[in-house]
Amino acid sequence: VQLQASGGGLVQAGGSLRLSCKASGINFSIKDMNWYRRSPGKERELVSSITADSITKYADSVNGRFTISRDNARRTVTMQMNSLRTEDTAVYYCYTSFRGRDYWGQGTQVTVSS
């Protein structure tokens, strides 16, 4: 199982970024997919999740600004991040579980400057 994340970068506050995570080695269409983030000095935080039925959930801190979606044909989960704030600066990881094991993408850095 591999999760390949991409799309991070440097953006000014108020800007947008789009993260993608491509999965291989799993039956992607039946898996819940998640985005986590970790900022320096903070606990890892669940940012958003999407079920196999495309039901979405968001952390309160990003609700209304971030949108998670999935493309089963491309085996990809995407998170559109708008109205970015300096506090969104973090390394973002996609995550899923499969057969009782946790799988993480390699992480992609998002830096929001003021």
Image: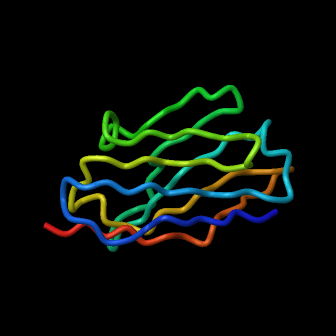
Judged left or right of residue 86, residue 106 is: right
Q: Position of residue 71 (x, y in %)?
A: 67, 41
Identified at 62% across, 57% down, the residue is: 21
Which residue is at the front of the view, 64 or 99? 64
Q: Quadrant of the N terminus?
A: bottom right
Identified at 86% across, 50% down, the residue is: 99
In the rendered view, would you say 65 is above or below 108?
above
In the rendered view, would you say 63 is above or below 104?
above
Q: Quadrant of the C terminus?
A: bottom left
Q: Quadrant of residue 70?
A: top right
Q: Residue furthest front?
A: 73
Identified at 65% across, 33% down, the residue is: 51
Judged left or right of residue 102, residue 67 is: left
Q: Residue furthest left?
A: 114
Judged left or right of residue 57, residue 104 is: right
Q: Position of residue 29 (x, y in %)?
A: 78, 38
Total tally of numbered discs in the picture: 0
| Colouring chosen for the image of the structure | rainbow
Judged left or right of residue 90, residue 70 is: right
Q: Quadrant of residue 27?
A: top right
Identified at 44% across, 39% down, the residue is: 67
Q: Quadrant of residue 64?
A: top left
Q: Position of residue 109 (x, y in %)?
A: 43, 72
